[in-house]
Image (cartoon, grey):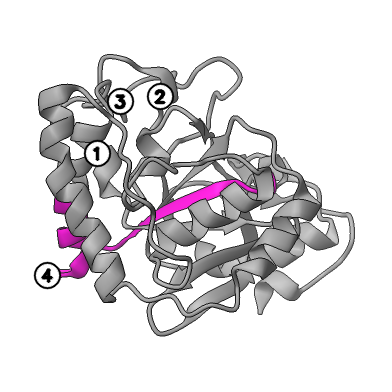
Amino acid sequence: CHAVSNFAKNDVGSVGYEKKVLKSGMTGKCVELPLPFKNKKEDIDSLPEIYATRQATLVAVNFDGRNVLINFDELQPGDVILSRGARPSISIGDAIVAYQKVVLAAQYPWIAEGHAHAVWTHVALLDENHQVWDAMPGLNVRARPLREVLRENGTISVRRSQIYIDPGQLSSSLLHFSNETYRIFKLETGGSLAARFVARRSRALNGDAHSTRAMPSDKSVICSTFVSSVLRHATQTGFFRELEVVVPGDFSADRMFEPVGLRWCRIADGGEASSVALK
C-alpha cells in the first residue's frame, strides 16, 4: 500500500513518491491498492467498518468467509480508475510503460526522469451506480460492477478531476460513446501514437507542451481516449484536447486530476442482511 502527499501538485517530480506520507485527512489510505485482498496475516476485524447497506454488499468480495471492500462510499461518479495487472514475463504492458515514460516526461515538465506515472496500463471510469466503464480490444465498451475489478490480480489507483462532473450528464456521455468499436490496433490510432512520440522532441527543444494536431476520431481510440472523450462530453471542457492521443499515464501526471485515498474495509455486523458478497 503506497501513500503519497500532495501528489498531483508536486513540482519536483515523482521519483519515490510512493514512500511519502498521506496529506492530512487521508491517514490510513493509499494511492495504490494491490488487488485482490489477500493479506492473511492481517486481522480483518481491525479494518475500518462500512455499514451493511445493500450497495455495500453488492461491492464487497469474499475473503475467507468475510466481506471486504474498498471505501467505495468515498468515491464519486466520474472518478478515474487506473490499473496495472500482475506482471507477466513478456506483455504488451511493457511496451505501454516504455512508451509512456518517454512521452509523459516530455509533456509534463514537473515530473522527473524515471517517473512512476507510466506504470498504469489501463484506465476506466466509475459511474453513480459503482459500475466501471472501459474500452477493451475485442470487447468494445463494457460496464461491470466494481466488485469484479476488486477480484482481479493487479494494482489500482483512483484520480478525481478538479472540474465537477454531473452524474446524470456522465451517464448520458457514457452511453453516447458506448456503441462504437474500440480497438488498440488501428491505423489512425497507431499514427496518433507515433505522432505524439515524434512530437516529444519539439516539446523538449522548444518548451512547448501543446500540439495543433487533431485527436483521432471517437471510433478509433484506446481505453484512455474513451475516458477522455466521455469526460470532455460530460463537462463540455477540453480535457487533453491539445494531445495527439491520450494515454493512461496522462490521468496520473496531469495536475487536473488529484489522487483519491483508498483502503480496504469490512462490512460491519448488522444492517441489511445479504449473502450477495459471498457468492
Task: Judge whether residue 73 can be spotted in this image.
Answer: yes
Q: In the rendered structure, which disc, 2 or 1, sits on the residue that comes first in sequence?
A: 2
Q: In the rendered structure, which disc, 3 or 4, sits on the residue that comes first in sequence?
A: 3
Residue visible at 19% across and 68% down in the picture: 92
- Residue type at tag 4: Ile
The image shows residue 17 at horizontal and vertical percentages of 30, 26
Asked if residue 238 is positioned above or below residue 172 in the image, the reply reads above
* Camera-side mark, 2 or 1: 1
Q: In the rendered structure, which disc, 1 or 4, sits on the residue that comes first in sequence?
A: 4
* Residue 7 tag number: 2
* Camera-side mark, 1 or 4: 1
Of residues 260 and 216, the one nearer the viewer is 216
**Magenta-drawn stretch contains 147:** no
| Horizontal arrangement in the rendering, residue 59 relative to residue 187 (left or right) | right
| Horizontal arrangement in the rendering, residue 7 relative to residue 54 (left or right) | left
- Residue type at tag 1: Leu
Tell me which segment is drawn in magenta: 76-99
**Marks 3 and 4, how far apart in space?**
28 Å
**Marks 3 and 2, how far apart in space?**
11 Å
Task: Name the residue that disc number 3 marks.
Answer: 19
- Check if mark 3's residue and mark 4's residue have beta carbons within 8 Å: no
Identify the image quadrant of residue 55.
Answer: bottom right
**Marks 3 and 1, how far apart in space?**
21 Å
**Magenta-drawn stretch contains 90:** yes
Identify the image quadrant of residue 194.
Answer: bottom left
Residue visible at 54% across and 34% down in the picture: 261
- Residue type at tag 3: Lys
Task: Name the residue that disc number 4 marks.
Answer: 90
* Camera-side mark, 3 or 2: 2
Residue visible at 60% across and 73% down in the picture: 178
The image shows residue 150 at horizontal and vertical percentages of 52, 62
